[in-house]
Amino acid sequence: MDERVKQAYESVQISEKAKTRIFHEIIASDKKEVKRRIFSKVAIFVMCVLACSSTIYAAHRLLRAGAIASMFGEEKLAKRFEAMSDEIVTAENDIYRAYFLGAVSGEKLCENEIDVENTKSYFVVALERKDGENLTYEDEIIVSPFVQGIAPWQFNIYNMEGSATRQVVDGVLYCLYACSDLEVFANTGVYIGVTDEDVFADAYVYDSESGIISLNEEYDGLNFLFELSTKASNEDVEEDTLSRQNDFMENGRQAINNLDEMMANSMLDEDSVMELQENEEGFLIYNYDDIVDLHISAKAVQKHGRDSFSFMDAETNTKIVKFLVVEYVEGKYVAKLYICE
Amino acid sequence: MNHSLDGTNKEEQFARDYEVYVNDIYRLCFSFLKNQMDAEDAVQETFIKFYRCRNIFCTEEHKKAWLVVAASNHCKDVLKHWWRKRIEFDSGEEIVGESKDMVDEMLELVMQLPDKYKTAVYLYYYEGYDSKQIAKLLNKPDSTIRTYLQKARKMLKKEWIVSEGSK
């Protein structure tokens, strides 16, 4: 079978015509300068960035959020971004400087978007190295919204219908993200995290009493946090939006605070129970059924004795359908999946 | 290929690299994106990044690995892109090569694999890397890569038997 798979790959070839065309386009594209746009200042804010140990910074050499949307061919989204102030909020550590370039919410802002029914939020973040070295496409970062009151590792870009696209221009990495509507959390508090850690358990600290999320200052990697002041575009947030938020928050709190009760009221999937080994990078990796390659911070499990991960229903994303509990008992990590009844 | 080069070393070097790797990168992109147009776009984006990047590649392997990872990342981003128009794979049109009847079915099976397995499958079956090399290249644990390959092999084998049995 191995040989057949190899033959399958070998059967695919790029045509000579396309090969030549692409080559010429690459050479030609290198000679074009990226156009920088000048933006009008219009004082309309859907969201504005507050602060969070960051400074407002006039970064003239940066492309603005509108230019990034435009670069991906989304003119309507670009116009919405352009209608915002072009003030940029920065945060930096010894190596990197991160820029929050803007966020907007709305319906049908992307002309070719597949999911046109729901309001979505879009935000743009840029990252550069302070030593002037260029970032490349190889530099992996994850950008995620977090909601005050729910731990970052339990509610993040992965369960907010997140999607992303990115581009490196002049050594600066620009990321355009879309996710479910952040205005839903207008009265709650929203953050945008930028990190190289995709489970968000080590890079951020969550205070379960106050619900406040902050940076883990001891994290040995890339972590930034921007705090957003969300302001719903309509003064009265619609009832269904509030209801959705309440449902979600209720479920979230339930998952965090009443884990024992939830475990008692749910069905343990016997086949899912397995002992996990910590890998060299400090992760426990869980694979079962449709849960593939879930990275769990061993440190977080050890610290609290256990950790849990909720899985929402795909349709409304508000109801927990199953949850994974990872316990640290007598030096062993044991994972168990519960199905909600 | 008739390159209209302006004589600079950078372009000449790029032309050589492009000639050597373009087909391999196209194959990888095609396995992700399943159609000629998107695969060509992905090839173009990958080589633009390669052309503009200032990395110094110590070996040809390093260079190739960079291209494979960059192409995979690009394809994954394209697939995640919310406004991507999904185009169904049309099995007859895009594949160029001999003995199509034998390999096309297998290619379809490869393309049906979950996206997260595809880079590892490509590197293992086509490039001949072992799981440790792939793990290093993709910055993932060796155990994860072995799991990917085992699952992919199981899926391919199962579907291949079904496909052969139905003939």
Image: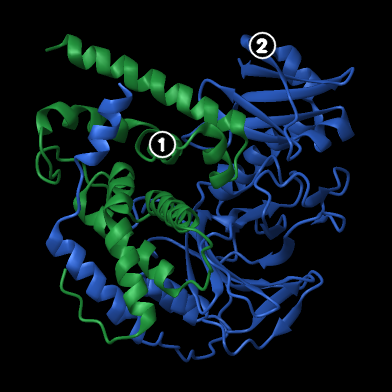
Q: Hue of chain B?
A: green
Q: Report the label total.
A: 2
Q: Is residue B142 above or below residue A245?
A: above
Q: Amino acid at mark 2?
A: Leu
Residue under the image location 26 percent in, 12 percent down: B161
Question: Amino acid type of disc 1?
Answer: Gly
* Labels 1 and 2 within one chain: no
Percent position of residue A214, x then y: 82, 57
Q: Secondary structure at mark 2?
A: strand
Q: Which quadrant holds residue A9?
A: top left
Mark identifier at residue A89: none
Q: In the rendered structure, the residue with mark 1 lies on which chain? A: B
- Residue A157 in the image: state x and y as whole percent: 58, 49
Task: State left or right for residue B73 relative to residue B167.
Answer: right
Position of A59 with respect to A29 (left or right) is right
- Is residue B108 in sight in this rendering? yes
| Residue at numbered disc 1 | B128
Say which element carries label 1: loop
Distance of label 1 from label 2 (alpha carbons)? 41 Å
Q: Chain A's colour?
A: blue
Q: Which mark is residue A268?
A: 2
Image quarter (top left, top right, bottom left or bottom right) of the C terminus of chain A: top right
Q: Position of residue A128 (x, y in %)?
A: 63, 73
